[in-house]
Image: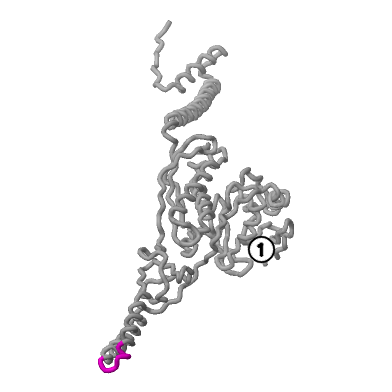
């Protein structure tokens, strides 16, 4: 493996249980998500990290780089101010020097120092840091079902065979007039054929059926069309097939306290789909209600970590100012919680964010006061500059000579005029 910048051979960083290829010159590293996740388990994070491979690629004017592992062209992804290179073929991720710390910054409870990649690993991913880390565990359940396809055949072919068998049964029944045994054979055949008709299943696009035989899961039937399955197989949801379409969950607005205790109203929508039908049916009682409750819980966990608002130059992330990053973390948190139910979270976005009514007026006054203070500060700074310029001009051009008392009086008049909210009323002194 060679560095994408200087073409130097990668060396192996072998510390703290990691074996990570890196360039000794540029300090760029190449790793895959399982190693990135192991790093996260050794750090004190406030939420689970996001897999860069799950982030949608973006188009940039920069020339794409070649994957040092498999030689394929890498894609650019943007997250939290960092542009990373990911390989769609081998799922590898390339971090330029310093990007590893910037990637983890959004997930860490304390802001890390800006440092090179290897120093970041030495500082935050060592064994001592792992001892004080408590990780969130995936929900454990008794059922371990996994989806697999059900055995089936084309329904029209099966129908043709049944029709041919029905013709023979009809012949046997008619022939029973002369041979009594054939009549019973024909009637028995009709009974069997009537039972076999229960094996026909009809599916529309983006629908599925979870089938069981005497209570045992035998597979999931997918694909639009006319199917024939084991007549003993029954659908777990006989009156309504499982929808595989992308759906939207809207739990309405919730009142949650932010990081500093202010009550705020937050509303989200979650776009999701059923990915594993067996998990969705057998692992939870009702996967729709399960998603709803887990979405509420994840929203509360995320909102409590951030203030509603923060000054732009403070470097503090807030719910209002960093909505994209908050949505990405919210999606990851919900996905971790509903993984056990076989659901895939496509997107999660905050649709409503406001202070609760009981403090909305007070917060509005606070924001207005801050805006007035900032405006006054700018006006005063400008006024002082203009007064200084006026005094310097008068002195430099020898227009008038002022003593200290006259200068103080002039400064006072100019500041009052420039900082006043109303227009100044000129007074012309004619004499005396």
x 44%, y 21%: residue: 420
| Identity of the residue furthest to the top in this view | 432
Pick whichever, 100 or 237, lies toward us: 237
Count of marks placed on residues? 1
x 43%, y 31%: residue: 358
Question: Is 179 covered by the magenta stretch?
Answer: yes
x 52%, y 21%: residue: 394
Residue 220 image position (x, y, % from top left)? 45, 69
Could you tell whether 18 is left or right of 373 in the image?
Answer: right
Quarter holding the N terminus is bottom right
Pick whichever, 175 or 318, lies toward us: 175
Q: Look at the picture and state if 248 lies above or below 174.
A: above
Q: Look at the picture and state if 385 lies above or below 195.
A: above
Residue 236 seen by the camera: yes
- Secondary element type, mark 1: loop
Magenta range: 177-183
x 56%, y 40%: residue: 316
Could you tell whether 80 is left or right of 209 in the image?
Answer: right
Pointer 1 residue = 3
| Identity of the residue furthest to the front in this view | 180
Pick whichever, 415 or 404, lies toward us: 415
Residue 367 image position (x, y, % from top left)? 46, 31
Q: Look at the picture and state if 303 lies above or below 178.
A: above
Residue 53 image position (x, y, % from top left)? 55, 60
Residue 388 quadrant: top right
Residue 59 seen by the camera: no
Question: Is 369 covered by the magenta stretch?
Answer: no
Q: Residues within 10 Å of mark 1 (few under 14, many from 20)?
A: many
Residue 180 image position (x, y, % from top left)? 30, 91
| Colour convention of the picture | one colour
Q: Look at the picture and state if 183 lies above or below 84.
A: below
């Amino acid at each position: 493996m060679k560095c994408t910048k200087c073409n130097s051979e990668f060396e192996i960083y072998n510390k703290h249980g990691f074996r990570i290829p890196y360039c000794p010159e540029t300090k760029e590293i190449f790793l895959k998500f399982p190693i990135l996740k192991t790093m996260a388990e050794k750090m004190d994070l406030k939420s689970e990290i996001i897999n860069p491979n799950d982030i949608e690629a973006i188009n940039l004017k920069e020339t794409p780089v070649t994957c040092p592992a498999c030689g394929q062209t890498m894609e650019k992804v943007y997250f939290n101010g960092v542009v990373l290179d990911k390989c769609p073929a081998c799922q590898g991720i390339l971090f330029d020097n310093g990007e590893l710390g910037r990637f983890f910054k959004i997930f860490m409870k304390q802001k890390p120092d800006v440092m090179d990649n290897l120093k970041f690993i030495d500082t935050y991913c060592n064994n001592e840091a792992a001892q004080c880390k408590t990780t969130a565990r995936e929900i454990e359940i008794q059922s371990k079902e996994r989806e697999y396809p059900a055995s089936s055949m084309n329904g029209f072919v099966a129908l043709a065979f049944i029709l041919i068998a029905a013709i023979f049964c009809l012949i046997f029944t008619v022939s029973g007039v002369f041979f009594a045994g054939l009549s019973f054979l024909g009637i028995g055949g009709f009974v069997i054929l009537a039972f076999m008709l229960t094996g026909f299943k009809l599916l529309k696009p983006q629908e599925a059926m979870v089938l069981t035989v005497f209570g045992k899961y035998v597979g999931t039937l997918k694909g639009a069309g006319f199917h024939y399955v084991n007549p003993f197989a029954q659908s777990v949801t006989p009156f309504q097939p499982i929808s595989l379409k992308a759906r939207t969950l809207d739990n309405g607005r919730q009142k949650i306290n932010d990081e500093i205790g202010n009550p705020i109203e937050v509303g989200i929508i979650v776009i999701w789909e059923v990915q594993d039908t067996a998990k969705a049916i057998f692992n939870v009682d009702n996967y729709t209600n399960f998603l709803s409750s887990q979405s509420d819980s994840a929203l509360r966990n995320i909102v409590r970590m951030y203030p509603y608002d923060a000054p732009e130059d403070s470097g503090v992330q807030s719910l209002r100012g960093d909505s994209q990053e908050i949505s990405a973390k919210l999606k990851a948190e919900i996905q971790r919680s509903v993984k056990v139910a076989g659901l895939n979270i496509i997107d999660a976005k905050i649709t409503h964010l406001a202070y609760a009514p009981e403090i909305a007026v007070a917060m509005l006054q606070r924001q207005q006061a801050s805006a007035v203070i900032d405006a006054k500060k700018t006006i005063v700074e400008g006024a002082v500059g203009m007064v200084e310029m006026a005094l310097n001009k008068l002195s430099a051009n020898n227009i008038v000579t002022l003593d200290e008392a006259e200068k103080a009086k002039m400064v006072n008049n100019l500041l009052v005029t420039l900082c006043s909210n109303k227009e100044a009323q000129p007074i012309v002194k004619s004499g005396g």
